[in-house]
Amino acid sequence: MAEKVITDNPAIKKRRSFREWKEDTARRLDVWSRKKPARRKFWLNKTLYLMMIPYLALFFLFTVLPVLMSFFLSFTYFNLLEAPKFIGWSNYLTLLLDDPIFIVAVQNTLIIAIITGPLGYVISFVLAWLINELPDKLRAFITLIFYAPSISGGAITIWSLIFSSDIYGYANSFLINWGFIREPILWLQTEKYILPIVIIVQLWMSLGVNFLTLIAGLKGVDRSQYEAAAVDGVKNRWQELWYITLPNMRPQLLFSAVLSISASLGVGAVTTALAGFPSINYAGHTIVNHLQDYGGQRFEMGYASAIATILFVSAIALNKLIRKIIGRVGS
């Protein structure tokens, strides 16, 4: 009798029906997820995907959406005062065929990128490789020295003092004292000196983050692999580097390469701080400077968006190329 009363209790029946519904739903979802591997993977990691939603929302809002808006605005005339007016490919045609300053900016950017990108990358790796062999305390101290340029806000001020145009500038003072010149050189006001100085400063500033990334990758290589490689016939440090060190560092190599590309193509603040805006005869004018000119000075947002789109596509293409090159390392 007591058992019948418990069985007939509405609350118990409700809990049982809910539990049965929950088990049935879980069983159906499990069957649904097994039909395709992607569904199965999503269902097994559903909690992780839910935790990613806030990040994905912010990423879409502040990265994807601005890129899409810039691409759309690049086909319009938009001056912030009037509604965007669709003009087709006009901005791109003007940019590529009727804007000589943009061509100068492309040339300067390519020169800076070709020199500072690969050279800074190689120098950072060689320094990281050599310093990684030092004792721990000395390695930590030297690492801080090389990383300092990337965290020091007054780095440009130091270079401005070095290449100051009066006799008190360090470069002029050194050259005058040693008899190389008689009068101070106007380093940042002379067209032929501006771009080489920008390259030197950009190269120096690019070493910090790349160096830190690469030395972290070197520290992550399992030392026992070198011992195993020696047994298998690896005879010198160069073979260790190619067959063991570099393949184990592919993620860090790729990350550092992306940083190098982004930094070299995004040069603009350095030229403005050193040579002013615009620089003498546009000697240090880069694509980013051209973008700042039309976007921040003239407020021609459609034209500026076309510049930004070309810069974005160029960076993506170079990143794809770098991925293929690094993918062949150690093969």
Image (tube, rainbow, N blue to C red):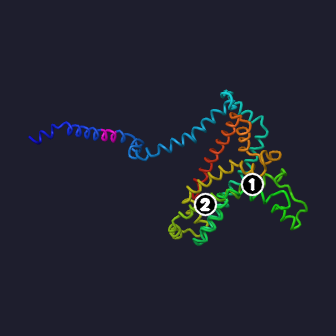
Q: Which corner quadrant holds the C terminus?
A: bottom right
Asked whether 9 falls inside the magenta stretch, the response is no
N-terminal label among 1 and 2: 1
Q: Is residue 27 magenta?
A: yes
Q: In this view, does 167 lie to the left or right of 122?
A: right
Q: What stretch is highlighted in magenta?
A: 25-31
Image coordinates for residue 317, horizontal then vertical, percent: 63, 44
Q: Nearer the viewer, residue 92 or 267?
A: 267
Within 10 Å of disc 1 (Cα), the crowding (few <14, some 14-19, many 20+) is: many
Residue kind at label 1, given as amino acid type = Ile
| Residue identifier under label 1 | 199
In the rendered structure, the answer to whether residue 330 lies left or right of residue 82 reads left
Residue on which the image places disc 2 = 212
For the image, the number of numbered tags is 2
For badge 2, the amino acid type reads Leu
The secondary structure that most of the magenta stretch takes on is helix
The image position of residue 258, as x and y in percent, is: 62, 51
Up-down relation of residue 276 to residue 302 (above or below): below
